[in-house]
Image (cartoon, grey):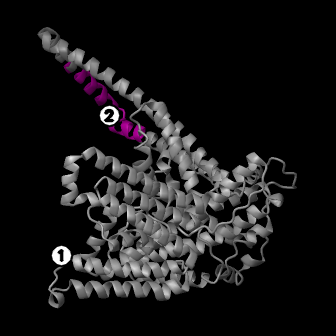
Amino acid sequence: MLFNSYAFVFIFLPVFVAGYYGITYLFNEKNLFNITRKKPACAKSVVELYCVILSFVFFAFFGVKVLGVLLISLIWNYIFIRLLGSGTDDKTKTLVAIDKNIHVNNNKALLITGICGNIALLIFFKYAGFLADILNLFTGKELTVSILLPIAISFYTFSQISLLVDVYKKESGKISLVNYLFYITFFPKILQGPIVRYNDMKSYLEKALLHRWSAQKFMQAMMLFVLGLSKKVIIADTLAVAVDYGYNSLAVLTPVDAVITAVCYSFQIYFDFSGYCDMGRGICQMVGMDLPVNFESPYKARNIDDFWKRWHMSLTTFFTRYVYIPLGGNRKGALRTYLNFMIIFTLSGLWHGAGLTFIVWGAMHGILYVITRAVKNRNKSKTNTRVNADLDTKAIVNSNIYTNTSVNTNINANMNTSANTKTVIETGRNANGETGAATRSETLAHKSLIYRLCHIAAVILTFIFVTVAWVFFRAQSIQEALNLISKMIGIGYNGASPLHISPDLIKCFQIDELWYIFKITPIASMTWGPAVCMWIIILISAYLAFISNNASQLTSRYKVNAKGAILLAILFVWSVIKFANVSTYIYLGF
């Protein structure tokens, strides 16, 4: 069951919200069960159980086999969580005091075994086919492996590993079966993240239980859900049709067609993934639970370092905490640090998909990231050198001042003279109509303009690189990606005009709701009329990605008034109408 479906929007979501508030009302009202909001432990358990039941129902819609893989993962990890957490009682503490080393070594062995089990499950279901292809390449055999790819296996596997490590480090506290199932299976985050730690998820729920229903906050949550829904259904799904056409018709694409295809995929994957995350956060906010933002306008990034601070932020945090730091982080020299970066980005590519194209995508980001960090470190080193030199100079001057009174007197005299001279000069400038303040203002304005132009150029260059990397991410093979890039720069194109846009590509953007409006205007009869929908979708996508506030910023800054409610209603109805079209969620198989 996807968020953008009739069953979810009109049945599952209302049942979840109504049931949640019904449970919190019954168990949190002092007059009924004498349980105050300061001690919502009972309500917490019941709410968690309620969410677990609904989450299993939600996940069961993807098929019994998919649910079965999730159950295998849950059983395996809960066994190791119990074994790792068994050292928290008094008997075990006594045992630890007797032989601490044996206990620590046993726990470490349990942790490694638990993590290896998760990785083995992930490799079997997600990478078996890829490994078979590599084996065929080196041995000449023709092994064929066809295994069902479970929904969201990468997301909940990383959550499992995170919890195992936290339990091993004694950072998670006591965990019951219901606590554990709620953390892993909670449906608003299991398909798209964010990948959060157990303690964080626990605190989100505890704060939600203290939350009192507010009409304004509920409307803001609805606003976030509707904005995410419209990004996914109206924009991303429309762009998906054009992208599919482009990749399936590489032989007939013009250079402009190829560029439009690549740019549209950059917008598609952003609005698809971020829109789904916005819907998940909106669902949680409807019941007072505020999950962290996973996307912070990534296409506004000025370099690749900035990009990865904005794109899928929880994944970046996971790799930093559980892979980069254990590898040594930046504590073992520059070369080792850069090697760790490359390992992280290669693993990130593999996490997204099983194929050489994903590895190339991760390696491209890793190489540019290493270059960017190396340049930053070099510039920082130069800046520190200049600062230290200035400090040394000041120290020498101050030493001379304090050790020689005559020097001090002369310096003060010179300073007074300089001040008087400066006053005369500035007075003269004022007489001629030029003020020092005006000159400084013009200089600052000039510097500000240069900074803005440089910032815009940096954003554009970063987006170009990210778009080229996305070509490999989307392509079925490296050769297909290279073919599209060749088309983009005009290599091997012998057509009449490289600026020609294929009519079939233009038709992919014809949203019926918009085209019906254009049909009653002279636009439809003009030669460029059919392309209007295409440019409207592309320009709106660019505006939302590069200029506008993102959905989370909009909902946190603006209250929903009458006009806003009407606009949201229009977007919601339009999105529901689009449910009838074919829709795919890119990250569903990750």
| Secondary element at image label 2 | helix
Furthest toward the bottom, the residue is: 32
Residue 168: image location, x then y, percent:
33, 54
Tell me which residue sits at (23%, 50%) in the image.
96
Which of the two marks, 1 or 2, is nearer to us in this view?
Answer: 1
Magenta extent = 416-444
Tell which of 425 and 568 is nearer to you: 568
Q: Which residue is mark 1?
A: 39
User: How busy is the neighbourhood of tag 2: few (under 14 within 10 Å), some, or many (20 plus)?
Assistant: few
Q: Which mark is residue 430?
A: 2
**Secondary structure at numbered mark 1:** loop
Is residue 424 located in the magenta-colored stretch of the structure? yes
Question: What residue lies at 25% left-to-right and 27% top-to-bottom?
Answer: 423
Q: Is residue 373 magenta?
A: no
Q: Is residue 522 left or right of residue 191?
A: right
Q: Is tag 1's residue or tag 2's residue first in the polypeptide sequence?
A: 1
Report the quarter where the N terminus lies: bottom right
